[in-house]
C-alpha cells in the first residue's frame, strides 16, 4: 500500500507537458509539423465558423542551432483573416488545455479536444523558455492586442505577459508565432510541403501564401468562393460508447434528470425509447430511476442502465451531421497539385459505419510525368475531417482499403498485397463528427471492418472511372501504332515484292494502294472502336454527373 502522504495529483497541463509525444511531439521533426498543423487547423476552423473565406499566410524559418542536441531553432508564423479573438480569451485559447469551445461536440471540425495549440505553446516554452506570441483583433476592437501567452503548467492556466495594443492594418484576424527547437523536413510524406499542398486540396476555398526555409514566397489561389456548409453538432450514439465513456458522459449532466440526460445527451433516444429501456426488468431497472438526478446514480446503477441500452434496438444516427467537399470543388482543387492529364473523383453518399455517420470522398489523378514514376507506388494523401494524415500509414483504415482492392482489374500494375504503382495521386478523405483515431495525436484512422469496406467501395468507383479512360487510351495507342507500322513497313514490303516478281511500275503502284487499303481497313475498324469507346465514356460521364447532383 502506498503512503498517502506521498500521493499527489497533477493538472491536465502537467500531464501533457510530460507526455507531449501523445499529442504529436514525439520527435523534433514531428514537433515542427504538429505546431504548424495546429495553428492552421485553428485558423481554418475559425474562418469557417464565421463564414469567412480563409486567407492564410505561413512562414517557417531556421534561426540557428537549438538548445537540444542536433536541433535547430525554428520560427513558425501563421496569420489569418478570421474573426479574431478577444484579448481576455487569448490565455484560454493558447495556454489552457481542454478549454476549446469545440470540446465534446459531435461536429466535423478539424480540432475537437482543445489540446493541440496549447501543446504547441508548451513545447515552445519547454525548449525555448517562452510561449506563443499572439496578435489578434476582432471587428469590435478599435486596436489589436499583442501579448506573450504561456502555460501555467502546475495549474493548467494560460498566463498573459507583455500585453500591448496598437493599430493593425486589418479589420480582424489573428497572428500567432512560435519559436522552439525542432528539425525541418520539407519534402517526403511527412514533409511540410506535403502538408501545405494537401491542405489546399481538401480546402478548395483556401487562399494560401507560404514561405519555407531557403525558398521564395509561394501562393496557391482558391478555386472556389463557395464555403463548405458546416452541419450542426450532433450527440453521440450510445451504441458507440464503452461503459467508462458512458459514465464520464453522465458527469456533464449531473444536475439533470436521467431521462433528460438520455434525451439531450444522446442521439436516437426519445420518450418511447426510454419507455422500452425501462421495461427491461432483467437488468434490474426501476421506473423511478429515470426521475432521479444523474449525479445521484451510483456507478452500479449506471452500469445496469448502460447494459439495458446496449440491448435495446436503436435507430442508426442521422447522416445530416457530415460535411462534403463536393465532386466539382475536389475536381478543381486536385489540379492544383501539378500537371494532371486525367483524374476521377467520387463523393459517396453519407452512410453509417459502427453507428457513426461517415462520408468518404476519393480523387485519383494521373500526373503527366508518366515514365519516371511507373514502377513506384502511387502517392497517397490521407485526410480525416480535412486534415492531412502523414504518419503511421500502414495501420490506417485508408491504406488497408487501398491494398484490399484489385487494381489490376482497373488497368494499374499492383504487386501482391501492396499499393498499385504508377504516376498517380490517390487522395482519400474521411469526414465524421466521431472519427476514431488510434491515438490522441490523430495520426491514423482506426481500421474497423465497416469503415474499410466503405472506403473500399469509394475507391472501386473511382477505379471504374479510371479504367474506362485507360481502355480508351489503349485503343488510341493501338490505332496510332498500326498507322505507324503502315507508314514504316508498307513501302518496304511493296518494293521487295516488286523486285522478286519483276513487277512493272503501274503494278507496284496498284500494290501500294492495295496494301494500304487492306491495312487501312483494319486501322479504320480500330478507329471505329476508339470512337465508340469515347462515346460510351462521354455517356458514362454524363450519368456520373447526374448521380452526383
Image: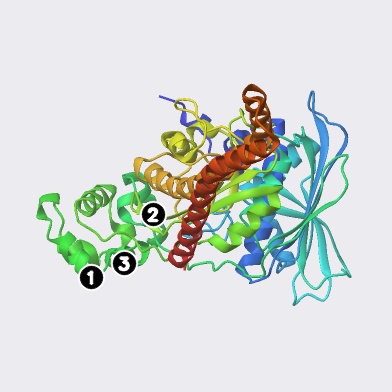
Q: Nearer the viewer, residue 40 or 133?
A: 40
Q: Does residue 217 sit above or below 139 in this rendering?
A: above
Q: Position of residue 467 (x, y in %)?
A: 49, 45
Q: Residues within 10 Å of mark 1 (few under 14, many from 20)?
A: few
Residue, disc 3:
263
Q: Position of residue 484 (x, y in %)?
A: 65, 37
Q: Does residue 205 sit above or below 18 in this rendering?
A: below
Query: Does label 3 or label 1 sit earlier along the sequence?
Result: 3
Residue, disc 2:
249
Residue 271: mark in rendering: 1
Residue 244 can be seen in this image: yes
Q: CA distance from mark 2 to mark 3?
A: 13 Å
Q: Secondary structure at mark 1?
A: helix
Number of the front mark, 2 or 1: 1
Q: Does residue 213 sit above or below 109 in this rendering?
A: above
Q: Which of the 4 quarters of the picture holds residue 492?
A: top right
**In this rendering, position of residue 382 left or right of residue 168:** left
Amino acid at each position: 500500500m502506498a503512503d498517502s502522504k506521498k500521493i499527489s495529483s497533477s493538472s491536465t497541463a502537467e500531464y501533457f507537458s510530460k507526455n507531449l509525444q501523445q499529442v504529436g511531439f514525439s520527435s523534433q521533426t514531428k514537433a515542427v509539423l504538429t505546431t504548424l498543423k495546429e495553428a492552421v487547423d485553428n485558423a481554418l476552423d475559425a474562418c469557417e465558423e464565421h463564414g469567412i473565406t480563409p486567407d492564410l499566410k505561413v512562414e517557417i524559418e531556421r534561426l540557428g542551432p537549438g538548445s537540444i542536441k542536433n536541433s535547430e531553432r525554428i520560427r513558425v508564423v501563421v496569420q489569418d483573416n478570421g474573426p479574431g479573438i478577444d484579448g481576455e480569451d487569448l490565455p484560454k485559447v493558447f495556454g489552457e488545455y481542454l478549454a476549446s469551445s469545440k470540446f465534446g461536440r459531435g461536429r466535423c471540425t478539424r480540432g475537437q479536444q482543445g489540446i493541440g495549440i496549447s501543446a504547441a505553446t508548451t513545447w515552445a516554452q519547454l525548449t525555448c523558455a517562452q510561449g506563443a506570441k499572439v496578435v489578434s483583433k476582432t471587428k469590435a476592437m478599435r486596436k489589436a492586442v499583442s501579448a506573450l501567452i504561456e502555460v501555467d503548467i502546475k495549474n493548467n492556466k494560460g498566463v498573459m505577459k507583455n500585453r500591448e495594443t496598437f493599430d493593425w492594418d486589418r479589420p480582424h484576424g489573428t497572428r500567432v508565432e512560435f519559436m522552439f527547437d525542432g528539425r525541418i523536413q520539407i519534402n517526403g510524406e511527412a514533409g511540410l510541403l506535403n502538408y501545405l499542398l494537401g491542405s489546399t486540396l481538401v480546402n478548395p476555398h483556401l487562399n494560401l501564401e507560404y514561405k519555407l526555409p531557403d525558398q521564395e514566397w509561394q501562393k496557391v489561389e482558391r478555386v472556389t468562393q463557395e464555403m463548405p456548409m458546416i452541419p450542426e453538432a450532433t450527440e453521440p450514439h450510445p451504441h458507440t460508447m464503452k461503459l467508462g465513456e458512458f459514465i464520464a458522459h453522465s458527469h456533464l449532466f449531473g444536475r439533470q434528470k436521467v431521462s433528460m440526460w438520455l434525451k439531450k445527451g444522446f442521439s436516437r433516444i426519445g420518450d418511447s425509447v426510454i419507455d422500452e429501456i425501462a421495461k427491461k426488468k432483467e437488468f434490474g431497472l426501476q421506473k423511478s430511476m429515470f426521475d432521479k438526478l444523474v449525479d445521484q446514480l451510483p456507478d452500479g446503477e449506471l452500469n445496469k442502465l448502460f447494459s439495458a441500452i446496449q440491448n435495446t434496438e436503436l435507430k442508426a444516427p442521422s447522416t445530416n451531421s457530415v460535411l462534403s467537399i463536393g465532386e466539382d470543388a475536389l475536381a478543381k482543387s486536385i489540379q492544383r497539385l501539378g500537371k494532371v492529364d486525367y483524374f476521377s473523383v467520387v463523393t459517396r453518399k453519407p452512410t453509417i459505419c459502427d453507428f457513426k455517420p461517415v462520408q468518404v470522398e476519393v480523387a485519383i489523378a494521373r500526373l503527366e510525368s508518366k515514365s519516371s514514376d511507373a514502377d513506384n507506388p502511387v502517392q497517397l494523401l490521407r485526410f480525416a475531417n480535412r486534415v492531412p494524415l502523414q504518419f503511421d500509414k500502414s495501420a490506417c483504415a485508408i491504406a488497408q482499403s487501398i491494398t484490399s482492392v484489385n487494381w489490376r482489374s482497373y488497368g494499374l500494375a499492383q504487386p501482391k498485397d501492396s499499393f498499385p504503382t504508377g504516376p498517380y495521386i490517390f487522395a482519400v478523405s474521411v469526414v465524421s463528427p466521431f472519427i476514431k483515431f488510434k491515438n490522441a495525436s490523430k495520426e491514423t484512422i482506426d481500421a474497423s471492418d465497416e469503415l474499410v469496406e466503405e472506403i473500399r467501395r469509394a475507391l472501386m468507383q473511382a477505379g471504374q472511372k479510371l479504367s474506362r479512360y485507360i481502355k480508351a487510351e489503349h485503343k488510341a495507342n493501338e490505332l496510332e501504332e498500326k498507322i505507324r507500322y503502315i507508314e514504316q513497313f508498307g513501302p518496304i514490303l511493296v518494293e521487295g515484292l516488286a523486285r522478286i516478281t519483276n513487277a512493272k511500275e503501274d503494278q507496284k503502284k496498284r500494290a501500294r494502294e492495295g496494301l494500304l487499303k487492306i491495312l487501312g481497313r483494319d486501322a479504320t475498324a480500330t478507329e471505329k472502336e476508339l470512337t465508340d469507346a469515347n462515346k460510351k465514356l462521354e455517356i458514362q460521364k454524363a450519368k456520373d454527373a447526374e448521380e452526383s447532383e
